[in-house]
Amino acid sequence: MMAMNKNQDREEQAASWVVDLFSGDNRINKNPEREAWYSEDARNADAFDKLKSLVENLDQVGEQALQEEWERELHAEADARKRQRWIAGFSSLAAGLVVAAVMTVSMWVGLPEPVSYETGKGQRSTIALADGSVLHLNTDTRVTALLEDGERHVTLERGEAFFDVKRDENRPFFVKAGKTQVRVLGTEFNVRLGASANIVSVLSGLVSVSQKSGDESVAQEIVQLHAGEQAEHDTAQQMAVVESFDEGAVMAWRSGKAAYHETPLSLVVEDLNRYFKKPLQIADASLADLPVTGTFNVTDQNVVVDALESAFSLMAVKRIDGVILLYARET
């Protein structure tokens, strides 16, 4: 599921009609298409009226200033010929103010705005950005993207995302995940935002991992990652542990699966709970360190629970509130 701002098209159309209104004789003549668009939706009318009011206010300010100048000119120069030349200049300047006002409105409407996308538990989504880059969002994830002329920025607010960044040497691509900042020109990598550490896994290209500390205005590079390398960035310690990684395990989520190898059951449960609305909970503390190896289909919680029960001698009991408790099966 994704959420994004849909007002920009309306604002741009409103600006276009305002330009049309203040062009030539259009302030007098009616435009059927403009009037139809204006009447179609109250939000259209509101956007048009606001921009029209802005232009008219700028025009009035300009006229008042020019009126004062005109009076001073009359006192200084009584010659009708000079006055005639000034009146002509007044008309040109007034027209210039209208053009400048319309240009100001157009520039204001055209400013890039951040756009947010998100998924719920158990959902995945693919987002194509305007620059040609593609974002793949895992379960329970939210990102905000802002594409500017000189830089591209994405903030990972929660969850996990895979980035396929279109290369542009003139527009670096930044990903902010908590205190972790990733900078690339064009590459493929995965970022997971964790409670105590953030994990960056690189599939291709070169990735710079940085962190801001205290009042620093510029992030300090912690490590550079090449294809096949992964960094677990501990922001509290301002350090990253770099190692190779199993691409199949890290990227299993893109096909609706979760893969583990000798992973403690406590960490497996923590990870699986990202996908399910009804959480799993270890009821027997002795099970916390039970090593788990296997690949689970996270699109169906019942299948996951059945697999845990049969493969690791567990027993699952669902509480009335929906929480699923895991016990060691009695032998």
Image: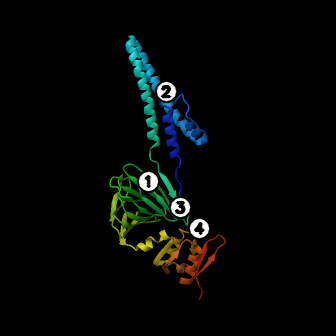
Which residue is the extreme one toward the front?
A: 32
Distance between mark 1 and mark 3 Cα atoms: 20 Å
Above or below, 254 relative to 144? below
Distance between mark 2 and mark 1 Cα atoms: 39 Å
Which residue is found at the position 39% from the left and 64% from the top?
Answer: 188
Residue designated by label 3: 119
Residue type, numbered disc 4: Lys
Q: Nearer the viewer, residue 165 or 286?
A: 165
- Where is residue 153? Give x, y as percent: 41, 54
- Where is residue 246? Give x, y as percent: 40, 74
Residue designated by label 4: 277
Distance between mark 3 and mark 2 Cα atoms: 48 Å
Distance between mark 2 and mark 4 Cα atoms: 58 Å
Element at label 3: loop
Distance between mark 3 and mark 4 Cα atoms: 13 Å
Please identify, in this view, whether the residue under mark 2 or under mark 1 is nearer the observer. 1
**Within 10 angstroms of label 4, few (less than 14), some, or many (20 or more) residues?**
few
Distance between mark 1 and mark 4 Cα atoms: 33 Å
Image quarter in which the C terminus is found: bottom right
Instruction: Name the side, left or right, on which 148 lies relative to 253.
Output: left
Element at label 1: loop
Residue 60 disc label: 2
